[in-house]
């Protein structure tokens, strides 16, 4: 039985203008009223998506969010981590060296702020919410745990990064293209599915109780793991091929279409 519905944001739950439609809002609140947990799964920190959490009413004592693509599972009200993982500065050093040699940008995120790496090409990375950006040379980065590194640049630049990535770097990171202009580098054990596994365990449940919605590479793990993994009609072709469950586009309230049918009385 499905007890938890996990939702990617961009190009899945959100419309193209970055809003949760009234139709999707009503459908998700309807299943929540039946006892189904609704969980947002994003690459962003919780502060950057707080307005979505409030809109959906996910502010109870037992509401959580999967952030940083699975690196942090956080309680929405207490902001206490349920599960956390990441990388060290030394883990990121080979990536920095490659990007510097090839003239590419880099942003590094801990669980609170963004460090645009100032000795590299300027990044176009942005985040909503009250998130601090502190330009820092890589050598001056503090020794701490980092959630992810991001290459944010025009699509053709991100294409070039992917084309030039050496095999040894591909073995060091879980690499996912979350948007055409964003390539993310996470620890090998970081994935939305891993964060969801920790959360399901917290509720004494497992993947057989999970429904997940997504459209892009960083959603692949949770779509494959879920009992019901749902690809949006606007999903990347390789994501569509992962599952036999499909729905309308993010502009057609695809999430509401599917959950309203699946959980109908």
Image: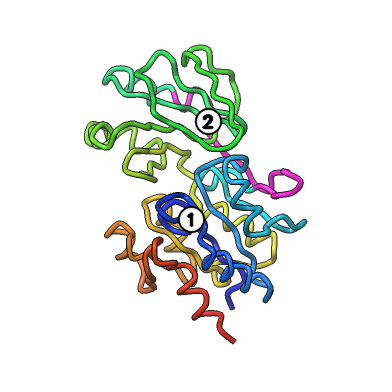
Query: Badge 2 is on which residue?
Result: 109
Earlier residue among tags 2 and 1: 1
Q: Does the magenta run of residues contain 90? A: yes
Position of residue 31 measured from the top left corner of the image (x, y, whole percent): 62, 73
Q: Which quadrant of the structure image shows residue 219?
A: bottom left
Specify the quadrant that holds the N terminus: bottom right
Q: Is residue 34 placed above or below 234 in the rendered structure?
A: below
Which residues are the magenta region? 74-92
Which residue is drawn at the image coordinates 34% and 32% (left, top)? 169
Instruction: Identify the residue under disc 1.
Output: 8
Residue for point 52% across, 66% down: 24
- Give SS at disc 2: strand
Q: Could you tell me how far apart the alpha carbons at marks 2 and 1 are, in whole angstroms?
A: 19 Å
Q: Quadrant of residue 103?
A: top left
- Residue 232: image x %, image y %? 38, 64
Residue 233, given in percent of the width and then of the height, sits at: 33, 65
Q: Secondary structure at mark 1?
A: strand
């Amino acid at each position: 039985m499905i007890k938890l519905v996990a939702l990617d944001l961009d190009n899945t739950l959100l419309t193209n203008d970055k809003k949760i439609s009234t139709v999707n809002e009503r459908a998700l609140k309807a299943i929540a009223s039946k006892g189904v947990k609704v969980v947002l799964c994003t690459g962003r920190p919780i502060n950057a998506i707080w307005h979505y959490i409030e809109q959906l009413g996910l502010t109870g004592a037992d509401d959580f969010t999967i952030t940083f693509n699975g690196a942090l599972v956080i309680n929405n009200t207490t902001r206490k981590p349920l599960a956390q993982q990441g990388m060290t500065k030394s883990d990121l050093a080979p990536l920095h060296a490659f990007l510097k040699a090839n003239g590419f940008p880099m942003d590094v995120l801990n669980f609170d702020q963004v460090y645009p790496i100032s000795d590299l090409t300027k990044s176009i990375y942005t985040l909503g919410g009250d998130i601090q950006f502190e330009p820092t040379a890589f050598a001056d980065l503090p020794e701490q745990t980092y959630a992810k590194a991001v290459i944010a640049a025009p699509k053709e630049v991100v294409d070039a990064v992917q084309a030039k990535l050496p095999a040894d770097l591909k073995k060091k990171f879980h690499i996912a293209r979350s948007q055409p202009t964003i390539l993310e580098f996470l620890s090998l054990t970081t994935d939305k599915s891993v964060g969801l596994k920790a959360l399901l365990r917290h509720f004494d449940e497992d993947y057989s109780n999970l429904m997940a919605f997504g459209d892009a590479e960083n959603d692949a793990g949770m779509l494959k793991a879920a009992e019901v993994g749902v690809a949006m009609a606007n999903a990347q072709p390789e994501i569509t091929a992962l599952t036999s469950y499909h729905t309308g586009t993010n502009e057609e309230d695809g999430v509401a279409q599917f959950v309203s049918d699946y959980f109908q009385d």
